Image (cartoon, helix red, strand yellow):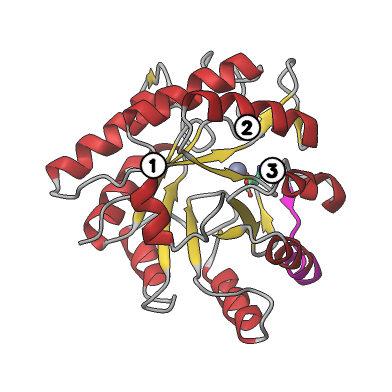
Amino acid sequence: MEKLIITACICGAEVTKEQNEAVPYTVAEIKREAKSAYEAGAAVLHLHVREDDGSPTQRKDRFKVCMEAIKSLCSDMIIQVSTGGAAGMSREERLQPLALYPEMATLDCGTCNFGGDVVFVNTENMIREFAAAMNARQVRPELEVFDKGMIDTVMRLHAKGYIKAPLHFNFVMGVKGGISAGARDLLFMAESIPKEATWTAAGIGKHEFPMAALAIVMGGHVRVGFEDNVCLQKGRPAKSNGELVAKAVRLAKELGRDIADPSDARRILNLPKRD
Ligand code: KMH
Ligand code: ZN
């Protein structure tokens, strides 16, 4: 089986220090959490940024400073910026970090309830516009799908040429409003994409490690981090994102899967060469 790519989602847009005091807001904190994830074995960093007071932002300048800080410590790590931002942000706001030509960015592939009154809006026109912005800059999209219908949307837009191969999906499992996080759900998602596509599983909350274990044995890849889950185990907040990555590494080793370094990840994802 191919080596396992671990993506660390160290910050997110909604999780707060009240939930886990190690959630990073400042540039120094983002740098610290990126380093801990990298040293534990993450090859890809899914990046959101915050203002110092914790409020989510998609400001280009804030991304630039954070990306430079991360690269100064983890020079070969693949940075995947979020174009999801926080629910409620405008499309112009969300697109800003693409101006920095990151290697990867998320492309959210459908509208979804996010619990309570929160709706994460991604209309078909938005998906096309975001995909075009990524294509124009040779930024590889990670296709964020929160339900099976979003895979169907991707395949329709792929057939029309808006979303280009190679296709790499992130199955977000267990959002309140998206697909649930059972073994049958993950199998359904994995069997619904083309054989040559790659995929990652991101289990939300208590589903993080069960989904990771399944992805490891099924040949998928894994996402862990504070954006999705703040606990190492029930009732025990993780001290860092690195602790969560280290747990995924332990699971992989026990299950006989080697860990991809950033260069392996670039090969597996077939990322275009950058200077
Ligand atoms: N913050 C969520 C509403 C992404 O990064 O592309 C959306 C999100 C997805 O986190
Ligand atoms: Zn995100």
Q: Which residues are magenta?
A: 119-128
- Amino acid carrying label 3: it is Gly
Where residue 107 sits in the image (x, y, percent)? 64, 58
Cα separation between marks 1 and 3: 21 Å
The 10 Å Cα crowd at callout 2, few under 14, some 14 to 19, many 20 or more, is: many
Was residue 216 drawn as part of the magenta stretch in this picture?
no
Camera-near label (1 vs 3) is 1
* Ligand 1 within 8 Å of the CB at mark 3: no
Cα separation between marks 2 and 3: 33 Å
Instruction: Choose the circle earlier in sequence order: 2 or 3.
Output: 2
Helix, strand or loop status at disc 1: helix
Question: According to the image, label 1 marks what residue?
Answer: 208
The 10 Å Cα crowd at callout 1, few under 14, some 14 to 19, many 20 or more, is: many
Question: According to the image, label 3 marks what residue?
Answer: 116
- Amino acid carrying label 1: it is Glu
Where residue 75 sits in the image (x, y, percent)? 48, 32
